[in-house]
Amino acid sequence: MMQKVVLSLLASLTLLQACSNAQTVNHEQKKEMTEETNHNMEQLVITTPNPNTESDTITLGAGCFWCVEAVFQRIEGVTSVESGFANGKFKNPSYREVCTGRTGHAEVAQIVYDPKVVSLAELLEIFWLSHDPTQLNKQGNDVGTQYRSGIYYRNDYQKEVAEKSRKIADESGLWKAPIVTEVAALENYSKAEDYHQNYYNDNGNQPYCSYVIRPKVEKVHKLFKEKLKDAYQNE
């Protein structure tokens, strides 16, 4: 049953990608979609053009930024991933300050990607299925507002794709609880300290990497193998 629901969600989000790129869906594509997807057809059409066609950047929060960084580093079309902080009360906080929970910042990954290779809609497919977006201000045993789920957009195009993608995910039935992911304009972004960068790749044998990050990476391998960079196909 779970596999069927995941496949249904992937089909719906793939349709969002197609509509985002082409603005319309032809008759043959419609025939291949589920009744639920067809029911949501008009909602999936993206009316705002993407102003960034050569390179784009989206900022995502999904718990510890080490996890988000590790997942998206492996996706074809992603050119760089940077761990950082966003949407707090002031600029350039330290990790220690953010960990108090009093700055209002979220731990995030800033993802630079080539829209000709991977679309924002495809990245959000991976986002939804690589963490639990129904957990408020936590992810697993990581608890605090800094671990909240969030999509932080830079323009109207990203906002529209994010909101429609969240709606599809929320209506998919994959989660028993409602999605609590915030969709908000990016504010006060800053890069985290150097030792947070490339963390999983450099520290894969540490307990947190083995027991928390690796299962998420393995899940992405299973669900999105065709989207992985060649270098990570057999890790």
Image (cartoon, rainbow, N blue to C red):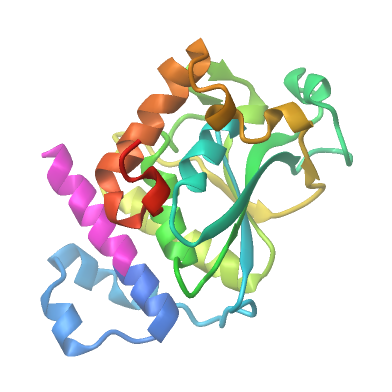
* Drawn side of residue 140 relative to residue 84, left or right: left
- The image quadrant where one finds the C terminus is top left
Tally of numbered tags: 0
* Drawn side of residue 219 relative to residue 136, left or right: left
In percent of the image, x 37 and y 52: which residue is there? 230
Image quadrant of residue 89? top right
- The image quadrant where one finds the N terminus is top left
Please tell me whether the stretch drawn in magenta is mainly helix, strand or loop.
helix
In percent of the image, x 50 and y 46: which residue is there? 72
Residue 166 seen from this side? no
- Residue 63 image offset from top left, x and y in percent: 55, 31
- Residue 85 image offset from top left, x and y in percent: 74, 38
Residue 165 vertical position relative to residue 205 in the rendered view, above or below: below
Residue 12 seen from this side? yes
Q: Residue furthest top?
A: 207
Residue 21 vertical position relative to residue 147 in the rendered view, above or below: below
Question: Does the magenta-highlighted stretch encompass residue 194?
Answer: no
177 or 149, nearer to the observer: 149
In percent of the image, x 27 and y 45: which residue is there? 223
43 or 112, nearer to the observer: 112
In percent of the image, x 58 and y 73: which residue is there? 157
Question: Does the magenta-highlighted stretch encompass residue 11?
Answer: yes
- Residue 124 image offset from top left, x and y in percent: 45, 55
* Drawn side of residue 4 relative to residue 129, left or right: left
- Residue 8 image offset from top left, x and y in percent: 20, 55
What residue range appears in magenta? 1-14
